[in-house]
């Protein structure tokens, strides 16, 4: 018979998903091609084949495979894979149209909370589709639609983190508390997921265990060869019938005895059948070898076996010559862990059987009627005999290792004695009588004997143990409450992180740092948070503090490449050539084709004043990542150093095209125009950059410098004052302020600023040169000579200018600040 086509397709799909879940992508692609060949008309086949290509990074193949089905808009999976491929191939319009045609398939669908370790949803929901549409619209430069789609994604699923970060990167003022809050639908979705996962782990409530006389002693059941069935079934049935005690242990012992019987050869004179027994020993037929069947609640108490008269004792007196000692388990070849086990087992059997039956029905006659109590006669020998079903030879062999008080061959049955307290029997030295067991100070009783009703009046009935009612269980918290509390905790954590990221995107760096430091310590020590804190310090121009965070980041995540270009810039500003070179080579050796590594290498060449090599590195970074805005900006800086201003403007404009909010590029264009003398355009671009980053001290100081060059020094001083407030440890900012104060005649304030700069950057020759000029203006020639000498030693290339200033020290000429602008 030919196999069913649908069954073949189902098996192939299961195989594909198996390999996808186990990251065997090549195997998944192979079987996806088999599925496509078997069922070429099914859009599911095209979807799985395209999905495998997408996971392998073959975006063109994914695009071509999913294109026919996605154009019709009949299969959501094909449309989504096609849109993802379009995003990578920069065919944004096609991807947007594909998802919009399939809008009816994903609208109002939410699969949050439905992905577990056992289940998953194969197709995207509304949040995923809206987030992808937002990325496509943003890449197409349709900011309005992109914001709308990102907002819809966050409304459907507040855990869509990339939608939130995209809104922040676009400069949208987001209300964080309105996004990260627990809604009823969100709690309901996760509650269903928790209930579904708990159903796979449902464990039956524990049944109350049967009462045992000595709970500290347990019979080891694992290696017992006579174990025929699990005792848990008997416990379960007894509990279901409302009983507390069961005689499952007694039945179990009888089955073991029967099993022991079967191991010895049966002879006509070796044992007695039911007609020849006086003491009941349970059934001896092979039936007990089968697993015991649990009793129901309507069965009567067990009938006593048929008993013969006392004359039967004389049939074969050899059977009772060497009865087994008390506390010895009949039928076992060796004792398990001493004599404690046997005593405990027999004790639990007698106690269980006595407590499970009414006192008047514990003994029955052959006809089934209860045995009437008889008067006590101290001279009458005891009727009860010890349990002995083995031949004499076997019994002697079984008891060979047990020490006895007298000869086993001449041992007689004990006679009835007056009632003696069972707590302590005078003169008892037997191994099983009154023996103190570890964990139980109660003496063992003669539970291996079958006790007659005539003897029962002299033996105290074992008391019924009354257990105190168990304490009421603690109220179990509903799963819905647990899920809601956990969800609120996660959303509160995300709210703090989102607030910090929003503040960082708005360049409120100090507030962002305060928010990040309020996170739990375990989350502060994660790579993402540590990188964000390093970036915040970098934007505040606290390069030394930023270096500390990035160093810790390298230790915590040495393979992380993201933000390493910023770390290399931090080292460039700190003039740490050795550390920067080591970082660059480490990144290049790790991943040769990463743009961050090439940016670090370019910064290393730039610090070494080899601008041509630096340009090659930055161009390589832009080739690897055409939308890497920071690489274009660094490339423009190198063109400025080479005085290639046209190329610098082109690089900066490429950076703005890649990222509209990349303020560094606007600053670079303003700097180019300032060098070209076009101060109006320079001021315009500086202002555009300051709108994006209103707290950047260098931008504000640059605006003051342009005003100063436009002979508006008085108007420039407020910009310098604000810049020094924002970055009090930035030497360049204070140096510009000192220049302006010197030009306006505020020499004391200028000297104060220059001394601060000298402490911040003692190796800069320009600072000492300006201090020499200021000292000359203040009439302190000795200090002026000292500062000129220090400047000359730090920068020998400017020796002609410095010597000229020293020669004109006697003159009252004005200040020359042409050195190293």
Image (tube, grey):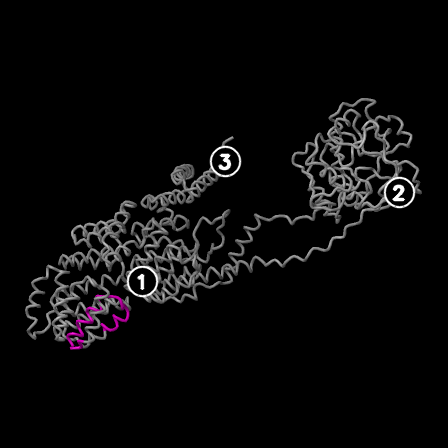
Asked if the residue under mark 2 is in contact with the one under mark 3, i.e. CB atoms within 8 Å, the reply is no
Judge the density around disc 1: few (<14), some (14-19), many (≥20) Cα neighbours within 10 Å: many
Q: Which element is circle 2 on?
A: loop
Residue shown at 80%/25% (left/top)? Answer: 392
Q: Where is residue 290 drawn, in percent x and y?
A: 72, 33
| 696 versus 585 height, above or below | below
Highlighted range, magenta: 719-747
Residue holding disc 1? 537
Disc marking residue 417: none
**Location of mark 2 (residue):** 418
- Residue 82 in the image: x percent, y percent? 36, 49
676 left or right, relative to 562: left
Q: Is residue 15 left or right of residue 388?
A: left
| Residue 250: quarter of image | top right
Residue 746 on the magenta span: yes
Q: Earlier in the sequence, mark 2 or mark 1?
A: 2
Marks 3 and 2 sit apart, C-alpha to C-alpha, by 86 Å
Magenta stretch prevailing secondary structure: helix
> Which secondary structure lies at badge 1?
helix
Classify 10 Å Cα crowding around label 2: few (below 14), some (14-19), many (20 and above).
few
Give yes or no for residue 442 being in the magenta stretch: no
Q: Nearer the viewer, mark 3 or mark 2?
A: 2
Q: Which mark is residue 4?
A: 3
Q: Nearer the viewer, residue 110 or 108?
A: 110
* 326 sits to left or right of 85: right
């Amino acid at each position: 018979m030919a196999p069913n086509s649908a069954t073949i397709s189902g098996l192939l799909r299961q195989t594909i998903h198996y390999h996808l879940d186990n990251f065997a992508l090549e195997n998944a692609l192979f079987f996806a091609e088999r599925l496509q060949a078997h069922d070429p008309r099914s859009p599911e086949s095209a979807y799985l084949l395209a999905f495998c290509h997408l996971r392998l990074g073959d975006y063109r193949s994914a695009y071509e495979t999913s294109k026919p089905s996605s154009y019709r808009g009949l299969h959501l999976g094909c449309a989504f894979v096609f849109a993802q491929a379009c995003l990578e191939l920069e065919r944004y319009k096609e991807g947007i149209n594909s998802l919009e045609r399939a809008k009816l398939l994903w609208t109002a669908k939410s699969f949050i909370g439905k992905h577990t370790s056992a289940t998953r949803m194969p197709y995207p929901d509304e949040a995923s589709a809206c987030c992808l549409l937002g990325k496509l619209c943003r890449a197409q430069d349709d900011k309005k639609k992109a914001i709308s789609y990102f907002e819809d994604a966050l409304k459907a699923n507040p855990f869509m983190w990339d939608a939130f970060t995209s809104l922040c990167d676009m400069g949208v003022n987001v209300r964080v508390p309105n996004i990260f809050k627990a809604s009823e639908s969100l709690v309901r979705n996760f509650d269903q997921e928790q209930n579904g996962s708990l159903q796979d782990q449902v464990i039956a409530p524990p049944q109350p265990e049967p009462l045992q006389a000595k709970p500290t002693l347990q019979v080891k059941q694992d290696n017992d060869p006579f174990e025929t069935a699990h005792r848990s079934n008997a416990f379960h049935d007894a509990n279901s019938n409302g009983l507390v005690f069961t005689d499952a242990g007694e039945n179990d012992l009888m089955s073991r005895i029967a099993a022991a019987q079967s191991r010895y050869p049966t002879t006509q004179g070796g044992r007695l059948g039911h007609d020849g027994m006086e003491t009941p020993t349970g059934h001896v037929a092979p039936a007990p070898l089968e697993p015991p069947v649990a009793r129901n609640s309507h069965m009567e108490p067990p009938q006593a076996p048929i008993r013969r008269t006392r004359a039967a004792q004389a049939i074969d007196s050899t059977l009772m010559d060497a009865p087994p000692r008390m506390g010895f388990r009949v039928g076992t070849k060796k004792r398990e862990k001493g004599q404690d086990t046997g005593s405990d087992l027999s004790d639990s059997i007698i106690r269980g059987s006595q407590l499970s039956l009414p006192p008047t029905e514990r003994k029955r006659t052959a006809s089934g009627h209860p045995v009437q109590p008889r008067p006590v006669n101290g001279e009458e020998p005891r009727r009860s005999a010890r349990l002995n079903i083995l031949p004499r030879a076997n019994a002697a062999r079984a008891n060979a290792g047990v020490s006895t008080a007298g000869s086993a061959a001449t041992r007689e049955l004990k006679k009835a004695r007056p009632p003696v307290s069972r707590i302590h029997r005078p003169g008892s030295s037997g191994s099983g009588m009154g023996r103190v067991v570890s964990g139980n100070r109660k003496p063992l009783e003669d539970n291996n004997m079958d006790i007659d009703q005539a003897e029962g009046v002299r033996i105290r009935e074992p008391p019924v143990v009354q257990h105190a009612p168990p304490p009421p269980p603690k109220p179990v918290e509903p799963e819905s409450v647990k899920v809601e509390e956990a969800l609120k905790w996660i959303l509160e954590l995300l709210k703090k992180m989102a607030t910090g990221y929003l503040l960082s995107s708005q360049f409120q760096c100090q507030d962002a740092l305060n928010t990040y430091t309020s996170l739990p310590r375990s989350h502060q020590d994660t790579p993402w948070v540590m990188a964000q804190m390093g970036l915040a310090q970098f934007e505040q121009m606290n390069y030394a503090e930023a270096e500390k965070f990035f160093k810790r980041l390298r230790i915590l995540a040495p393979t992380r490449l993201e933000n390493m270009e910023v770390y290399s810039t931090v080292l460039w500003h700190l003039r740490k050539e050795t550390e920067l070179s080591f970082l660059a080579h480490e990144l290049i050796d790790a991943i040769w084709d990463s743009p961050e590594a090439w940016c670090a290498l370019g910064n290393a060449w730039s610090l070494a004043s080899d601008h041509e090599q630096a340009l090659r590195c930055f161009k390589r970074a832009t080739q690897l990542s055409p939308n890497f805005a920071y690489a274009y900006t660094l490339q423009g800086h190198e063109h400025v150093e080479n005085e290639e201003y046209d190329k610098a403007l082109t690089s900066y404009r490429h950076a703005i095209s890649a990222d509209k909010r990349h303020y560094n590029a606007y600053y670079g264009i303003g700097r180019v125009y300032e060098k070209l003398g076009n101060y109006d355009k320079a001021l315009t671009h500086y202002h555009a950059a300051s709108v994006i980053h209103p707290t950047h001290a260098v931008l504000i100081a640059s605006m003051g410098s342009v005003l100063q060059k436009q002979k508006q020094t008085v108007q420039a001083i407020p910009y310098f004052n604000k810049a020094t407030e924002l970055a009090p440890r930035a030497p360049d900012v204070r140096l510009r302020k000192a220049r302006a104060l010197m030009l306006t005649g505020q020499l004391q304030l200028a000297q104060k600023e220059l001394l601060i700069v000298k402490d911040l950057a003692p190796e800069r020759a320009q600072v000492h040169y300006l201090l020499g000029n200021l000292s000359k203006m203040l009439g302190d020639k000795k200090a002026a000579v000292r500062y000129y000498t220090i400047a000359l030693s730090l920068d020998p290339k400017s020796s002609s200018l410095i010597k000229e200033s020293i020669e004109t020290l006697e003159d009252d000429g004005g200040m020359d600040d042409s050195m190293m602008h």
